[in-house]
Image: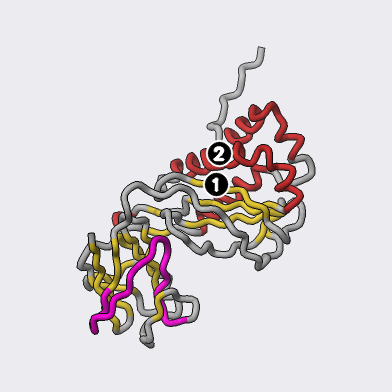
Amino acid sequence: MSSEPEEEPVSVLQRFEKRLEGLVEGAFAKVFKGVVHPVEILNAMQREAEAHKAILAGGRTLVPNRYVIDLSPYDHSRLAPYAAALAQELAQSQAEFIGEQAWTVYGDVIVEIERGDGLDTGMFRVTAEVYTGGEVAPVQQPAYDAGGYGSPYDQQGGYQQHGGHGGGPRSVGLVSGDGRTYPLQMGSTVIGRGDQANLRLPDVGISRRHARLDYDGNQVVLTDLGSTNGTMVNGQRVSAVALNPGDMIQLGTTTLTFRVDG
């Protein structure tokens, strides 16, 4: 009798496939015959997490926790009865993947499956973001097909917000040297001097998209977006850092003080 070969460690993708087999008695296999397959979606979600890493203070790596999957109208209609179950499986597998990489997320991993009007059958798009409970404009991602990237499409699909957090968010903002106050909204705020910035500062030392502030109702994380002159907090150059009340942020020749009320 031949001895059994040693089993290799089971990957997140393999475990995910195994769970899909047991879900709704293999109905997934029929649903996905000839159209987009969930493993391709999970692969794309893993790539998006990898592409959107931000280094926090203490060397932790923050990655997106919210993934909106746009499917073609045909795929979406075929998948509709299983969408909730699939979203749950994708979220669990993505959480396992993030855990294995020892990355950090805000709160739970959330997956939403949407109808992507304008996507061809078999194509899908994954939009990844750090979701903090507020209204965040996701970055438009290219569409994927089973072979990799397809052509990007411009239409921004709507998506629902999920339940809020207990306890109202604190009022936070930035105060400039001349006393002007810039309140921060929940979610992401881009600081820069270009049209795409949410908070525009007329300072030639500031890049068009200089830095981003992510506010989850609890803490604010400042991330430098590869600016030319860098971002300083309390005199130290930073790539990403959680802010404390009274911190002095310097971009170009502009100094902003981080303030928390309540």
Is 31 positioned to the left or the right of 11 in the image? right
Residue drawn 64% across and 41% down?
83
Rendered-image quadrant of the N terminus? top right
Residue 175, given in percent of the width and then of the height, sits at 26, 75
Label 2: few (<14), some (14–19) or many (≥20) C-alpha neighbours in 10 Å = some
Q: Is residue 250 above or below residue 133?
A: below
Residues marked 1 and 2 touching at CB (< 8 Å): yes
The residue at which mark 2 appears reads as: 88
The residue positioned 45% from the left and 54% from the top of the image is 131
Quarter of the rendering containing residue 250 = bottom left
Q: Where 183 sits versus 108, above or below?
A: below
User: Which residue is the site of mark 1?
Assistant: 111
- Local SS, label 1: strand
Looking at the picture, the colour scheme in use is secondary structure
Does the magenta-highlighted stretch encompass residue 188? yes
Find residue 123 and report its image quarter: bottom right
Q: Is residue 148 visible?
A: no
Please report the residue visible at 40 percent of the width from the left and 80 percent of the height from the top: 200
Q: Amino acid at mark 1?
A: Val
Q: Which residues are magenta?
A: 175-194
Amino acid type for the residue under numbered disc 2: Gln
Judging depth in this view, the residue of 235 and 70 nearest the camera is: 70
